[in-house]
Amino acid sequence: MSGILVVLEDRAEKIRSTSWEALAAALKLGSAQSVTAVVLGAQTEALAGEAAAKGVGKVVRVEHPLLARYTADAYCAVLQQLIQNESPTHVVFPHTYQVRDFAPALAARMGQALIGDVVAIEDGPVFVRQLMQGRLNGSYRHHGNGPCFVSVQTGAFRADTVEMNETTAVTTFIPNLDAAQIRTKPSEPFREAAQTVDLASAQRIVSVGRGIKEVENLGLVQDLAAAIGAELAASRPICDNGWLPMERQVGSSGQTVAPKLYLAVGISGAIQHLVGMKGSQCIVAINKDPEAPIFEVADYGIVGDLFEVVPALTEAVKAVKA
Ligand SMILES: Cc1cc2nc3c(=O)[nH]c(=O)nc-3n(C[C@H](O)[C@H](O)[C@H](O)COP(=O)(O)OP(=O)(O)OC[C@H]3O[C@@H](n4cnc5c(N)ncnc54)[C@H](O)[C@@H]3O)c2cc1C
């Protein structure tokens, strides 16, 4: 057994950004040369082209007319064949709804478990998963024969660490697949949520918490978000109150985000909130309580009253841009 397979997922004929994060995770397990990126479909040329531009050893196009629409049965059948062919040490996926649908069954077929929703990879390799709403971290090591199946949490690995490469070899794998093997009738792909805002791919987020006190005060953070070109997000109480839509909630029961800038305004930093944003590249927190837990993950902390700090910051940003 050698090498690492990373199974990329696409939507509307584009590789999804979470797949590049899975690729970044795969690159923590081995050299770029040892990583093979896998794309699946009925026609995968464009997807393979996207993957081949990344710094990986090889791209494999798994092509079959019956892969035109996703089904768990077809994905399990063809990936099992590919894995038997390639004999990788690890198979890495993004932890998407689609992966949750088929990857545990694929791993079980091959006598393995799936280490799901991994947030970090340490030497060993040891895979870290969060337990009990993020209160505890569990460390998992793969034992025994056969490949180790891993899916990685959105936002846990940095897609921008993957280097580019113009000379990646692309090969095609034609699996044996029969319509009789597919027990389900494909329907519309599952949508993670009917969202008008995609916080997961936002570069800048201004996130507001209960410190804002009243719905009428939200304009303050909306102005700041507009000034810095950020998406507006919130902690759970804000969304529970109906002050902002649920799709803007960050945390264990909301979205996981990893922007370049996460500006937390009047948010205490409860663990359920932190698990959704601590992968952000730069965290700035504004809170009047110097002991607020948000400061433990913040790169920059501003201890002060948000009703003074936020308008001043908005004006300062506008002045710089003027
Ligand atoms: C199963 C479960 C799932 C959950 N999922 C989520 C989730 O997905 N996302 C989430 O966010 N929470 C979630 N929670 C809730 C979480 O535990 C916290 O209750 C919540 O995150 C607190 O939100 P907050 O920080 O806005 O409010 P608070 O904890 O009330 O904090 C408000 C902060 O504002 C500061 N503040 C007050 N006034 C000012 C001022 N004038 N200027 C500056 N600072 C000020 C205070 O010092 C305080 O730190 C979940 C809880 C459970 C049990």
Image (cartoon, grey):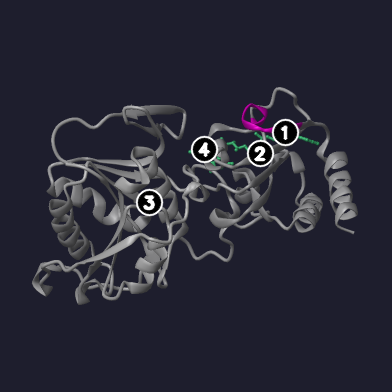
Which disc, if any, is residue 248?
A: none
**Direction top: furthest residue:** 291
Q: Nearer the viewer, mark 4 or mark 1?
A: 1
Q: Which residue corresponds to the image point at 63% horizontal and 53% vertical from the top-left?
A: 203
Identify the secondary structure beneath mark 1: strand
Q: Which residue is mark 2?
A: 283
Residue hosting label 3? 94
Q: Where, quadrant-wise, is the N terminus in this rendering?
A: top left
> Residue 121: image x %, image y %?
39, 34
Give the residue type that dot 1 points to: Tyr
Of 6 and 103, nearer the camera is 6
Magenta span: 294-301
- Disc 4 to disc 2, C-alpha distance: 13 Å
- Residues under labels 4 and 3: Cα distance? 17 Å
Residue 106 as seen in the image, left or right of residue 97: left
Asked if disc 1 and disc 2 are in contact, CB closer than 8 Å, the reply is yes
- Return the disc, 4 or 2, that comes first in the chain's sequence: 4
Q: Residues within 10 Å of mark 3 (few under 14, many from 20)?
A: many
Between the C-alphas of marks 3 and 1, the distance is: 30 Å
Image x and y of residue 257, in percent: 55, 48
Cβ of disc 3 within 8 Å of ligand 1?
Answer: no
Q: Is residue 153 above or below residue 183?
A: above
**Residue pointed to by mark 1:** 300
Give the residue number, with chain letter if any, for mark 4. Answer: 275
Residue at horizontal 53%, vertical 42%?
276
